[in-house]
Amino acid sequence: MVGEMLAVLRALARIRVTVAYATILTCVTTALAAVGPLTRNRVTGHASTNLHNLSHGHLGTLFVSAFVIDAGPIYVWLPGLVCLLAVAELVWHSARLVVAFVVGHVGATLLVAMGLTAAVELGWTSTDVTRATDVGMSYGASAVLGGLTAAIPSRWRPAWTGWWVAVAGTVVALGGDFTDVGHATALVLGMLVATRFGRAEGWTAPRLALLLVGAAFGYLMLTNGGLTLAVAAGVGVAGAAVAKVCALTPGIA
């Protein structure tokens, strides 16, 4: 019994960032569910990284917003998120997982904010967007998903990259919402930052299982259901095929 408990503790220690983040999210989400909608909306509004908050110097929202989730029941999204973060932490270790997540969450938020500011100033979008609710872990999770690219075996990496780039591009083209742009931006940021991570840990059957669930979660997060989910899958397959052909063709790869 003691040996089994020690084995579990050792396994959890290897994904300590994932466990800690999931625990905090569970506590915050449970607390918000227990209060009334008025208080919940007030907390969400204060934590939002919208233009109104950022322009008034509320830079703390860049940190706090990652812990306030407005994405439905926690049992729907937390297991997939945990699988995604856990596999990234196992192959890249804790520090690199944090780097990928922070770069995606903060970087994508600021880049989207710059784009929205320009759009509002030029009259391309309504000023209502300045107070839009923008909280959650999706930018950081998208970056972690992108960061896994450099850990994928080289023979599968072109197809993996082509799939996700095509999926993200399709979602942006069909959706057009600023969060879709943010997800695509974070995905690319994760891919770029992971090129500096060096050598990844090897793949095992449990890690591949986590990758499968985590990637499925990432896909649902990016496409957000509906027609986009089906269309993006078809375009993603085409993107993976094209990328693989290009990688195998001399002079193109």
Image: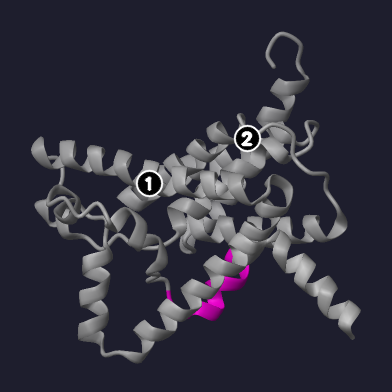
**Mark 1 highlights which residue?**
106
Check residue 76 for magenta coloring: yes
Amino acid type, mark 2: Gly
Q: In which quarter of the image is residue 96?
A: top right
Q: Is there any visible trace of residue 123 in the rendered image?
A: no
What's the mark number on residue 220? none
Q: Looking at the image, tell me whether mark 1 or mark 2 is earlier in sequence order.
A: 1
Q: Where is residue 252 in the image (x, y as percent from the top left)?
A: 68, 13
Please tell me which residue lies in front, 31 or 9. Answer: 9
Secondary structure that dominates the magenta span: helix
Relative height, residue 59 to residue 169 (above, below): below
| Foreground: disc 1 or disc 2 | 1
Question: Which residue, given by chain and number where applicable, does mark 2 sit on?
Answer: 162
- Relative to the observer, which residue lies in front, 65 or 131? 65
Left or right of 74? Residue 125 is left
Q: Can residue 144 be seen in this view?
A: yes
Look at the image and give the residue range highlighted in magenta. Answer: 72-81
Percent across and percent down for residue 36 are 26, 90
Left or right of 126 in this view: 60: right
Q: Measured from the top left, where is residue 32 in percent x and y? A: 35, 83
Vertical arrangement, residue 192 with respect to residue 73, above or below: above
Q: Where is residue 119 in the image (x, y as percent from the top left)?
A: 17, 39
Q: Which amino acid does label 1 sit on?
A: Val
Q: Disc 2 on helix, strand or loop? A: helix
In the current view of this chain or complex, which residue is farthest to the top?
251
Residue for point 72% across, 34% down? 157
